Each structure stands twice: as C-alpha cells, then as structure tokens.
Amino acid sequence: MTEAEQPVCVIILGMAGSGKTTLVNRLTSKLYSSGPPPYVVNLDPACLEVPYPANVDIRDTVNYKEVMKQYGLGPNGAIVTCLNLFSTKFDQLLSLMKKNQGRHKYYLFDTPGQIEVFTWSASGNIITEALASTFPTVVVYVMDTVRSVNPVTFMSNMLYACSILYKSKLPFVVAMNKIDVVDHNFAVEWMRDFESFEEALDSETSYVSNLTRSMCLALEDFYKDLLVAGVSSTTGDGFDELLQKLVAAEKEFHDVY
Ligand code: GTP
C-alpha cells in the first residue's frame, strides 16, 4: 500500500463547546461528497446523540449512566472509567480498522467534551499511542475563535494547544472554528506578528498581560510551522483548506515517523 492509499487517523480535540462534534459532522459530509467515506468513531460516552453516522460508538460498549451508578462516580470520573473500559477492547477496533483498510482514507475520532479527560488520562494515551503505532495519525485541535478574541484568552488557548502537541507528539492542525461569527484573521495576525499581538495587549493592564507578552515570544517556534485553517462547522466554510492542512499533517507524519 502506497503512502497516498494509507488511511489516516484524525483525533479531534478541543475545549468543551469548541465545536468538535459539529466539525466531525461537517468533515464527514464533506468527505462523503468528495471521495471515500470516512470511518467515524465516537469516543464520547456522555453525549446524548451524535449528528453523524458513527461506524463505532463507545456508547454501544459502555453505559455511562450505569458506570456512574455502579462505581459511585461523578461525571468526569465516569467518562474516564468508560474510556478505560473501552481501551481494554481497543485491539478489536484496530483489527476492524485494519480489515477496512482501502475503503476509507480518514478514520475520524470524536473525543469527550472535557478535553483533559482524554488528553490527561491513561486510556487517552493508550488509544493515541495504539493508533499512532498502527496508522499515520494527526491531531486536529478545535479552537473556539469567538471565545479567543481576547488576547489573554487566546494565549491560554494556544498554551493548551501547545501542551497537547508536547503530550501527543503528533502532527497538529489548529482548526479555528466558528468563523461565521468571528473571522480568524486577527488570530493568524497575532501568531505572525508579535507587535500586533502586543498592541492588542495594550488595553490589558493586569500582571498576566506581561506574562502573556513573554509567553508569546516563547511560543514563536510553536507558531512558526503550525498548520492553521479557519473553518465554520456550521456553514462548511474553510473545509477545503482544512483538508489541505490534513494532507500536510499526514506528510509530516510520514517524514518524521
Ligand atoms: P462538547 O463535546 O459537548 O463539549 O462540545 P463540542 O466541542 O463537541 O461542541 P459542539 O459540536 O457540541 O458545539 C457546541 C456549540 O457550538 C453548539 O451549539 C454548536 O451549534 C456550536 N457550533 C459548533 N460549530 C460552530 C460554528 O462553526 N459556528 C457557530 N456559529 N456555532 C458552532
């Protein structure tokens, strides 16, 4: 199988409410209309319903409410436990995915709402590593552009993105979502031009603004080669660019791993 024919796993991560599920849904329909259909996996045990046709759904394997009751857990503890239970059967999913090779270009993974239950849990690690050691794997970090117009909030979002890059060590695409509400150009400008970011910070007088200035310089390397696409998961704008960035991220995977 050539590199171009090899499937790619895309793990979709992002803060609660950033639009992960809506993005997976939009990406799924985009892929359906432009090539081989994607293989979609829902890893969020606590969601009520998913808008896309999931090939594999964690809710078919573990019952979130039952786990909460049985183990006496709170919402996040129950999500982690569901992921732990699911990860013990992950080899079965990998076998299924291998069997389906050739039929799908993209395997999409929608993750739980609270980002840290995936990125900071043992099972999240196990799943990420199992995928990356079997198929080319990339991360899409969904950023809520509307919630990032404040430079301090933007910086805290970027620091989070950077920490995920460190943790996953996988090629990384930032999808600046909700551009139907706020255009993402301000954020791209802040990444490219430190002075414009400094200007935006001028109105901030708190001690964090000084810290944010220093952080921005520290993140220069992170920004330099970062793959970014502005998208609206609601209207579908920017998804051609997102697909191009996914191809670039896949290439990065092949070059580095
Ligand atoms: P959780 O997993 O539940 O934390 O959320 P999520 O990250 O999967 O986000 P979800 O897709 O549920 O979207 C959260 C809210 O943002 C919903 O009300 C969506 O309709 C809205 N939303 C998602 N994408 C967009 C977008 O591109 N534009 C606008 N205007 N709203 C969006």
Image (cartoon, rainbow, N blue to C red):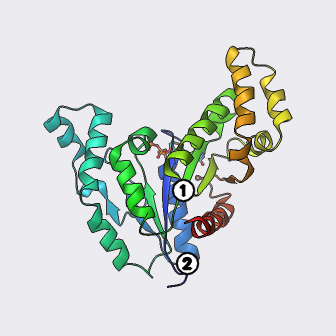
Sooner in the amino-acid sequence: mark 2 or mark 1: 2
Say if residue 189 shows up in the picture.
Answer: yes
Amino acid type for the residue under numbered disc 1: Leu
Q: Secondary structure at mark 1?
A: loop
Q: Is residue 51 above or below residue 102?
A: above
Instruction: Give me the disc on residue 35.
Output: 2
Q: Which residue is outermost to the top?
A: 206
Say if residue 44 shows up in the picture.
Answer: no
Q: Is residue 48 above or below residue 172?
A: above
Compare residues 203 and 136 and report the one nearer the observer: 136
Q: Is residue 235 above or below residue 193?
A: below
Residue at 50%, 77% (x, y): give it: 6
**Residues under numbered marks 2 and 1 in contact, where contact means CB atoms less than 8 Å apart:** no
Residue at 57%, 79% (x, y): give it: 4
Q: Which residue is outermost to the left?
A: 70
Q: At which x and y percent is residue 135? A: 45, 69
Q: Where is residue 209, by image quadrant? A: top right
Q: At which x and y percent is residue 150? A: 70, 29
Q: At which x and y percent is residue 123? A: 33, 49
Q: Secondary structure at mark 2?
A: loop
Reading the image, the residue beneath label 1 is 170
Residue at 59%, 67% (x, y): give it: 250
Residue at 17%, 42% (x, y): give it: 66
